[in-house]
Amino acid sequence: MIGSSSSSDRNAQGQSALRWIALALVLTGAGSCDRDIPAQPKPARPVATPGNSDTEAGKNTAAVDDAPSNAVAEITTAAAPPDDSPPIDPVFVDVAEEAGINAVLFCGGVDKDHILESTGSGAGMIDYDGDGLLDIYLVNGWQLEENPSAVKTRGKNVLYHNLGGGRFEDVTDKAGVGDEGWGCGVCAGDFDNDGFVDLYVTNFGPNKLYRNRGDGTFEEVAERAGVADPGWGAGSAFFDADGDGDLDLYVANYIDCTLDEVLAAERTNTWRGKVKTMPGPFGMRGGRDKFFRNNGDGTFADATDEAGMTDIAESYGLGVLASDLDNDGDVDVFVTNDSNPNFLYRNDGNGKFTEMGSWSGAGLSGAGGAQAFMGIDAGDLDGDGLQDIFITTFAQDTSTLFRNRGKLLFDDITTTQNLRAYTYDQLSWGCGFFDMDQDGDLDLMSVNGHIYPQVDEDPSLAESYAQQQTLLRMDGGKYTDVSNSAGPGLKLRVSGRGLAFGDYDDDGDLDMLITAIDSRPLLLRNDTPAVGNWLKVRLLNTKGAPAINARALLTVGGVTQLRELRSGSTYESQNAFDLHFGTGRHEQIDRLEIIWPDGKRTEQTGIKPKQLLTIRQPST
């Protein structure tokens, strides 16, 4: 997040300089860039072949078109209704209060003098006790006094157990997950292969690792496991980097500072020449991201340098996406950096990585500038079997949509999708692709909220601290902003941060959990009239835990949709692990193929929609 005096000043002071820094890094080979990768060519775009069961050394195979594909204005989507069917307005209703979700999530003082007081915290939708119902985990920060600045309240993380019937119960103390550190984010995964979902919580200060005992309680083991990273943690994700069957861990670190510096901070910047605001991140030392390799015995080793993931630039990391972005059978890592080029770590297939963000086209915007990149999600918008990327950014700038062309090359298609009109004025954080109306294509949600309360003091800025959230519906290959017609829940104005998707009420559509600064969260129940049918897929590994980075390819009406089961992403948050598909008006699913983390494939045919389908990974 850039706190300079104006949008033009930001570009002059930050983006121009960073373009030269990025160019210098590329030319010198710094940052482990592969100098043999051409910067300009546009190779043929791989086309997904879900029916091909052939594999080579665990790598998924794909056919290739004869000609390259350029960015287009419209996206060819999956199973949308016929053109003569008018779109149905979505309906989201905030039910947090009636559901019993009432914890206030603190983040500093009222005036927000230091950047730590602005970044907020995330949340997770997880089934921690295996009863089939989604529970909610909220990460909490601290509340500060003003004049003089001092710690007023140490907020405690909260775990809500889903009782069914739309009600939740606070079981934080019973479960043993009520950390009182200054909390930031959460991701989930079974790190010790015992079949139970564990939680990793990033903090301003030592992070926490909650080992699930399987009896409704957790044991905090971060120090013993070697992952109590003492920095300012932000996004994180579990994934199997080296194919050994154990989940490794990547942690993005934002800024290197102390609590004393936070308490002594003053507002010394000027936003758009109008109001005094907090400084940062420029002028502050960035934190260094960490990669921890799982030893297979309940402990981890810091393998950041060995894996080729050294954050030499100290680039203000915020978001982490662990995903197989090039369909080669291993998991790559994309890191969003605030006001610096993004990292894209290509997995070289042996647990080592090559950083190629600048080469990929997704390290900077299409205009060549480093944006204030924050939240991130990936989804296959156009049905080509390649996952495209959406990243949120600061106010007076546009969030960015990158189309995946294959071989880890991306095009910025933000302008052709008219996203500038929808995202320029907002300051955006958590984001995600989801099919809100079951029509078979991916809609897009973006959580908004300013970091400067002072923008409310000057009406000429035409900005606000609390903001409406942005909901974009995919209509005929282009996104349409439907935020104002999406029910009372989307009309609420908060300074939002984290976002998690999940079907907490088990009615077949995806609901949303949104965290907000110094406020209780929003639990937005999806009451949208369904355009089509749905299918939920629960993928379990051989231990009975979520099969992280398994992919499901569902074919209905001759069109294939892709979903990937991931740990982390959005912004400091964790989505539910069940994969959700809208199937349009089709009453039967042609084919469902699962690509497991070890490269094996299984398939089913003749599946009926409107059910939860649980599939376990074959043991041999």
Image (cartoon, rainbow, N blue to C red):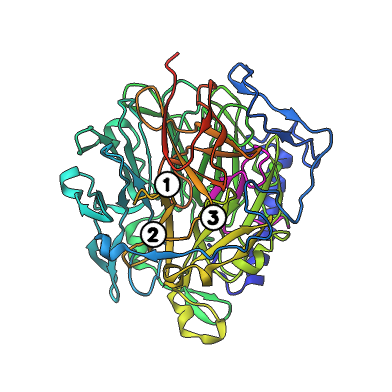
Q: Give x and y (percent) for residue 153.
A: 22, 64
Residue 388 drawn in magenta: yes
User: Which residue ends up furthest to the top in the rendered image?
Assistant: 620
Horizontally, is 85 left or right of 580 in the view?
right
Q: Which residue is mark 3?
A: 531
Stretch of the chain drawn in magenta? 367-389
The count of marks equals 3
**Is residue 550 highlighted in magenta?**
no
Do we see residue 105 in this rendering?
no
Tell me which label, 3 or 1, sits earlier in the chain: 3
178, 423: nearer the viewer: 423
Q: Which residue is mark 1?
A: 575
Left or right of 294, for residue 140? left
SS at mark 3 in the image: loop
- Residue furthest out toward the front: 587
Q: CA distance from mark 3 to mark 1?
A: 23 Å
